[in-house]
Amino acid sequence: MSVASHPSTSLSPGLPRAAAKPRRKRRRDLSGLLYVAPAMVLVLVFFALPLGMTAWMSLHNWPLLGVPRWVGTANYKALWNDRNFWNALGFTARYTAAATLGLLGVGLALALLVEKPRRFAGVYRTAFFLPVVIGFASASLLWAWLSNVDSGLFSPLMERLGLTAGRINILATFEPAFWSVTAMVIWKMAGFYMVILMSGLQSIPADFSEAARIDGTSALQRFRHITLPLVRRPFALALILCVSGSMLAFDQFYIILAGGPQNRTVTAVYWIFSQSFVSFRLGYGAALSMVLLAILLILSLIQLRLLSDREDAR
Amino acid sequence: MTLALPSEARTDRPVARRPAKNRPMRVLFHVTGVLCAALFLAPIAFVVLGSLRSASETVRPPLPPWPEGEPSLASYARLDAFGDGILTYAGNSLFVALGTTVLTILVSVLAGYGFSRHRFPMKGFAFVLILSTIMIPFQSILTPLFLILAKLGLQNTLSGLVLIYTTLQLPFSVFMMRNAFDAVPKEIEEAARIEGVTGLRLLVFVMGPLVLPGIVTVGLFAFLNAWNEFLAALVLLTDQSKFTLPVLMTAVRSGHYGAVDWGAVQAGVTVMMIPCLLLFLILQRFYIRGLTAGAVK
């Protein structure tokens, strides 16, 4: 699932306000439950139950067919020694760092470019944003074609521009393949981060910087002391979405590279997928999932902590 | 059509209108804007134009990107020759996307109304439980989802996929709908009650139109996410006739005997992209609202 799938992650869900009114109609209590029931059933059956099952399955040797057998922590011990898993995690971390830097950097640059309501700024924004709404699968297939050595675009283009001597197969060696996929993700998702960051930039009251301008501050000072502190919150949201989304990367590496070259672009989710649904080691896949889940939760908590500290300080 | 942000409707931001001396800056702004826009749009243009090239042209690099001979639909014909035909797969995708949209709207409108206007035991817990699903990636619970669908007799069905996609949409949709209902003044509901309109009729005929923007936002996200989802569809659909477009396209892309028909891939990508682009261009106001709902507050 792409980052865009969870655009709404709110940092403070806002709990329901405490009921202050005296409860006079008991019947309404029940009707409220009825309204919420369908959503609750879906969440319990397709979220809470599978979450519990993942933990349970991770303690079993669980083949696709046949009887699951309790193995205790054997799966976790096995994954501790699973070089492929740690390589996949390492690769995922590397990709996350590259994608996050690229996306937040390009996103911020685009946001600063089109933030002000100038003529045609809206048209540019729409153009930058369009790749966001096409699916990761579509974007990946498109990129696989463009990166292809024979009938693609990038290789002959680089040749004509004199960057390479002759055509090279971008996807055949690790570094060019990695950067091609990362470039695809930046192309596809930068517009998303542009909007998140821009909404932060635009929420700065204009009089703030007007006042500062009158006080004779430089543009750089205004950016450092007014813009930056005020965009921290959307920036933190963008960071969390970007890190958790990249840590879950699968589509682009599966579709464009199929794990190659030399199996060096297998991401964490890809490894879980192949253990669970190609080798059908469901219990082992569940144990891998639990570890990935723990890592993601820890990462999110750290980022949320950083965010809330900043807010308190304000 | 342009991408406007909510705050742009306000007029309290002074539009940069310092004349004359800013001319070079303005030119620079537009040059940068046009160049970047071209860069972002080029891949989309390349694939759409490329899909119209003839078979002999698709084996060559797309320079120039447009068909040099007559535009040809041959790539689409070859895509259609794959498996059960492109209409079947587009139909599967449409079923999943529309099913998810309808079910998501139904469930989240009910839940949003319940959370906004009713008090009931465990309400806080229920709300947090639904929202917390956003913290847990579905990729990590895919294996049990596979088994649960099998137990329900829904393995390898499009309906099973609809149920899962709807669940994935719930945290965003319920949150969105609760906020939409919160924004409706209580007096309107009271007045309707005095008129004798209650229960579901009140929800559909009185509240419904008032929260329509929220419903469109929720439906748009549900459609696009279901239409584009890949991993769950890849895992949960085993029968080729059930494939959604993204899953079909990986089969097309892996090609016959190692030779990839890039023309058919371009045609398939175009078929997958067009509905998303059109929906977004028509409804972008709602998309941006949904996107910024979590960011600014």
Image (cartoon, coloured by chain):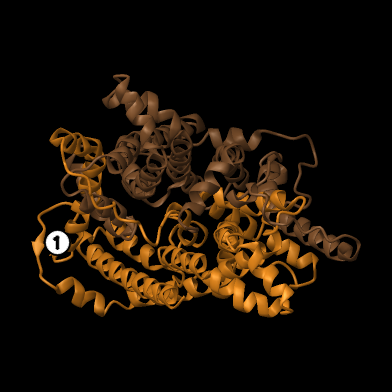
Chain colours: A orange, B brown
Q: Quadrant of residue A225?
A: bottom right
Point out residue A125 in the picture as x, y percentages from the top left corner: 67, 53
Secondary structure at numbered mark 1: helix
Residue under the image location 79 percent in, 50 percent down: B64
On the rendered structure, is A263 left or right of B171? right
Q: Could you say which is closer to the camera, residue A220 or residue A76?
A: A220
Residue under the image location 26 percent in, 42 percent down: A39
On the rendered structure, is B201 left or right of A104? left
Point out residue A123 in the picture as x, y percentages from the top left corner: 71, 48
Q: Quadrant of residue B17?
A: bottom right
Task: Look at mark 1 in the image and give the residue it sits on.
Answer: A56
Residue A280: tell me if it is visible.
Answer: yes
Single out the residue that lies furthest toward the top: B196
On the rendered structure, is A38 left or right of A314? left
Point out residue B282 in the picture as x, y percentages from the top left corner: 60, 36
Q: Could you say which is closer to the camera, residue A222 or residue B194?
A: B194
Point out residue A104 in the picture as x, y percentages from the top left corner: 56, 68
Q: Quadrant of the N terminus of chain B?
A: top right
- Mark 1: which amino acid? Trp
Residue under the image location 20 percent in, 35 percent down: A34
Q: Could you say which is closer to the camera, residue A137 or residue A230?
A: A230
A129 versus B274 height, above or below: below
